[in-house]
Amino acid sequence: MDNLKTLLNNAAASQFGSGWAWLSVDDNNNLFVSSTSNQDNPLMDIAEKQGSPILGIDVWEHAYYLKYQNKRGDYLQAIWDIINWEEVSKRYEMID
């Protein structure tokens, strides 16, 4: 879990400007972490790595500015307290 947290936080922190960090499942049912800019996502043909997203972390400024101002890192640390892992697991199980 610590490795997953590190990978997702790195993907989110390194996303320049607006975008997302994703936990997704590829065609072989392997989990992978990626990030996309703006409104893009792993389902799109233009995504660097394609797959089915099961968790998205919004790193558009509107997601955290009111509480964290420009401290994206603080937001990324706090987000782990509210992720619904039961739902993420359910979404993983739903992948064919």
Image (cartoon, grey):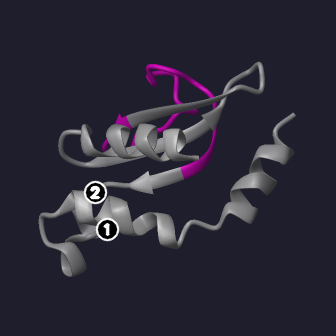
Which residue of the protein is positioned furthest toward the front in this rendering? 2
Q: Secondary structure at mark 1?
A: helix
Q: Which x, y percent locates residue 58? A: 39, 56
Q: Which residue is mark 2?
A: 60
46 within the magenta span: yes
Q: 65 and 37: which one is in front?
A: 65
Disc 2 crowd rating (10 Å Cα; few below 14, some 14-19, many 20+) is some
Residue at left offset 52%, top offset 73%: 82
Q: Which mark is residue 48?
A: none
Q: Label 1 near label 2: C-beta < 8 Å?
A: yes
Give the residue type at disc 1. Ala
Q: Is residue 70 above or below residue 25?
A: below
How far is mark 2 from mark 1, CA to CA? 6 Å
The boundaries of the magenta stretch are 36-55
Q: Is residue 64 left or right of residue 29?
A: left
Name the residue carrying label 1: 63
Q: Residue at x 16, y 63 (%)?
A: 71
Give residue 16's position: percent from left, percent from top.
Answer: 19, 39
Disc 2 residue type? Answer: Trp
Q: Position of residue 76 (x, y in %)?
A: 34, 59
The reply, left or right, for residue 83 in relation to residue 8 is: right
Task: Identify the image quadrant of residue 43.
Answer: top right
Measured as percent of width and height from the top left, residue 80 is found at: 48, 64
Taking 7 as reference, is 74 left or right? left
- The answer to which image quadrant residue 67 occupies is bottom left
